Image (tube, rainbow, N blue to C red):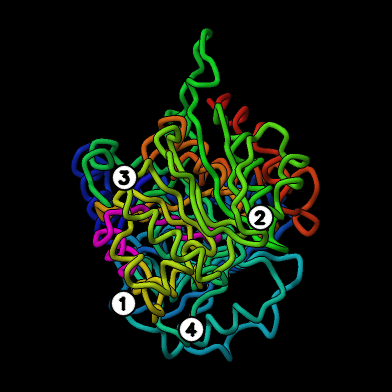
Amino acid sequence: MKILTAAQIRAADAFTIAQEPISSLDLMERAANAVVAWLTQRHGSETPFFVFCGPGNNGGDGLAVARLLHQRGYDLHVFLVGAGPKQSSDFTQNLNRLPQEIPVTPVTSASELPTALPQQAVALDALLGTGLTRALEGPFAQVVDYLNQQPVPLVSVDVPSGLFTDAATPAGSTVVQADITLTFEQPKLAFVLPSSGPNVGEWHVLPIGLHPDFLAQVTSPYQLLVPENVKKLLRPRAKFSHKGTFGHALLAGGSYGKMGAITMSSQAALRAGVGLLTVQVPQVGYNILQTAVPEAMVLTDEQADYLTQFPEDLSRYQCIGIGPGLGQAEASGLALENLFRQKLPPLVLDADALNLVASNRQLRQHLPPGSILTPHPKEFERLTGPATSDDHRLQLLQSFCAEHDCYVVLKGAHTCIGTPTGDFYFNTTGNPGMATGGTGDVLTGILTGLRAQGYSALEACQLGVYLHGLAGDLAAEALGEASLVASDVYRYLGAALKKLSQNP
């Protein structure tokens, strides 16, 4: 699903209005009906709504929603902020359509608002939409502060007021802290940026019938991973397949006290469907791997506590994953540098392999093209330097991927896949229960297993990231988020694959 800019959404509206044809007022009515359908499915007619409208088209949406809720028997009160000579035509027409029974209060300061909204109520934010380019001030800032203090569910129409949709909102800005955001047709970039999390809350995309021809031809470097497209990447298994059909992967890592990481990564690679798996560990890990992962073959280093070498013959492997539990011993860094100078199968690098690359300019310069790197934000910062904002982080990601011809899986709530072509893919699966040690090691195993099966680097990233989050969601559904641990994620990976393959 493409993530469009505010300008592209306006262009989509204009294209739809011209091609159907349909009036802008009727298109607004479609949007309002979509919001009302969502709200009325979740709130009975005993729920009062307090609707806060600005003078533009976002406020027009709010007025239309108020009228439609009133028609369905809901009690509500409308507050108009900033209405006047600059209000939009569609806002004015929807204001004129409001039934006289609906109380309407013009607001010039927060002092004119009720001291507190009733706890059984829902507040609807329709103050300002997607076109905002400067921080709120005056009455709008006051009303937003007021809404953020109310002890009621706060629902934003299209976008939380005060939020920049195409970029990170400046720190310290006054922005609605929505519990729910109901956006129209396509998601906004701000929804997947970490700094916007407290403002957007849980967000839902509501189709409003924008013209499919426009949506098909418009381009965007930002996309969401959605099940109908990820499912297409799955490859069916032929009846006469054998273990050699699905590739041979090598996972290398582990060190004294950190054998759990490579063990979980190994389990995940197997659950991802790889045909054969070899794991290289220091001697301290031999008994652990042979016991915990009996399906894997184990190679041991000459050193007891950390890795100092890689197998001489790498031709038998279709992918090598390096890093889980590796440690940062100098000898491990030298082994990695020597490895990078060889002709290699595809690589997946994680954890301490990334830290070794970050600390050694020679390693960065010899990073094999097409490699997949899986840093969390702090590991990414070590590779590129600190980011001053979410926007800057995306710029750093784009530059790093282009410079090194690699794919970076930047882990987070909406894990972002950066590509050498400058395209970004944001994940839509996963939950806060996965914020626990070891889930990244599981992802490394999944990616290594998929890459060894012959999936391209981009396909492995898209499919692996989505399945990783989906397995976490299934685990959380069964066990709860607070008690979820990394091994639960690989245990639910088979269920995730099954669910994705069956998704209509």
According to the image, label 2 marks what residue? 261
In this view, which residue lies farthest toward the front? 302
The label number, if any, that marks residue 133 in the structure image: 1
Marks 3 and 1, how far apart in space? 50 Å
According to the image, label 3 marks what residue? 343
The label number, if any, that marks residue 115 in the structure image: none
Element carrying mark 3: loop
Q: Earlier in the sequence, mark 3 or mark 1?
A: 1
Which marked residue is nearer to the observer: mark 2 or mark 4? 2
At label 3, the amino acid type is: Lys
**Residue at image point 36% right, 37% down:** 456
Element carrying mark 2: helix
At label 2, the amino acid type is: Ala
**Residue at image point 33% right, 72% down:** 361
Element carrying mark 4: loop
Which marked residue is nearer to the observer: mark 3 or mark 4? 3
Q: Position of residue 54 (x, y in %)?
A: 42, 73
**Residue at image point 48% right, 45% down:** 311
Magenta range is 395-416
Is residue 384 depicted above or below 26 in this figure? below
Marks 1 and 4, how far apart in space? 13 Å
